[in-house]
Amino acid sequence: MSVETAVGGSQIAAREAIHPAWVRVTHWINAIAILVMIGSGWQIYNAAPLFDGLRFAKSISLGNWLAGALLWHFAAMWVLAINGLVYVTLGILSGRFRRKLWPISPAQVLADAKAALSFKLSHDDLSRYNAVQKLLYAGVILAGIVIVLSGLAIWKPVQLQELTALFGGYDAARYVHFFAMAAIVGFLVVHVALALIVPKSLRAMITGQ
């Protein structure tokens, strides 16, 4: 095999990668960070619940007590914020978000949702997102931005009082933070279910192919 052929083959393989290396790396770092934040966040929530009767079991929370949960939460917060910023920046600069997530048509979302519920939605081409995937991925990116900003507003309500005020005050920011968390958990449930239904999508996020 000639050098030219080898190089050409490598270029083709690179072009055919469903998920480039930066997507895969940031995806798994985000996954670990968000799971740590959710588990520790549930333990923090239990110390000052927003809703009567809603508590998270110790078996699914992280940190054992408030101080321990806060340590986990703050550590994962910086990982999520920095890694998320890298992911969003590269997604915009590379044009991946524009190619993968746009346009989103409400009519197509309804059509693809109906096809998915009837198990008729095709998953043959993993390089192309259907309308439901576009909506979910765009939504979880937005939820991730909201949860980081609302978390900062809760963490530093005096130093970041303008940000806290933007969310309607400290108490309102806690509710925003909670519902952003709920949206991300909902996304994770659907995301994991789809990965189990379409195992090759999980392989693609590990190997790129």
Image (spheres, rainbow, N blue to C red):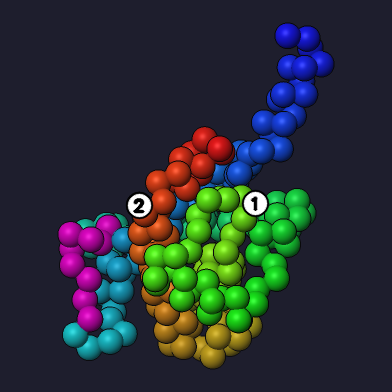
Q: Can you give x and y, in whole percent of width and height, for residue 73 in the image?
A: 40, 59
Residue drawn where x is 57% and y is 50% of the image: 125
Residue drawn where x is 19% and y is 85% of the image: 53
- Residue 86 as seen in the image, left or right of residue 143: right
- Residue 2 as seen in the image, left or right of residue 120: right
- Residue 94 as seen in the image, left or right of residue 72: right
**Position of the C terminus by quadrant:** top right
Residue drawn where x is 65% and y is 73% of the image: 104
Report the amino acid beneath label 1: Val
In the picture, the disc for residue 196 is: 2
Report the amino acid beneath label 2: Leu
Residue drawn where x is 75% and y is 51% of the image: 94
Mark 2 vs 1: CB contact within 8 A:
no
In the picture, the disc for residue 86 is: 1
In the picture, the disc for residue 188 is: none
Q: Can you give x and y, in whole percent of width and height, for residue 68 in the image?
A: 29, 57
Q: Is residue 46 visible?
A: yes
As for residue 59 lying within the magenta part, the answer is yes
In space, the residues marked 2 and 1 are separated at their CA atoms by 28 Å
> Residues in magenta?
54-62
Residue placed most toward the observer, 76 or 138: 138
Q: Can you give x and y, in whole percent of width and height, for residue 45 in the image?
A: 30, 74
Secondary structure of the residue carrying numbered label 1: helix
Which circle's residue, 2 or 1, is located before the other in the chain? 1
Q: Is residue 171 above or below residue 177?
A: below
As for residue 78 lying within the magenta part, the answer is no
Q: Can you give x and y, in whole percent of width and height, for residue 98 in the image?
A: 73, 62
Q: Is residue 158 above or below residue 86?
A: below
Give the tally of numbered discs. 2
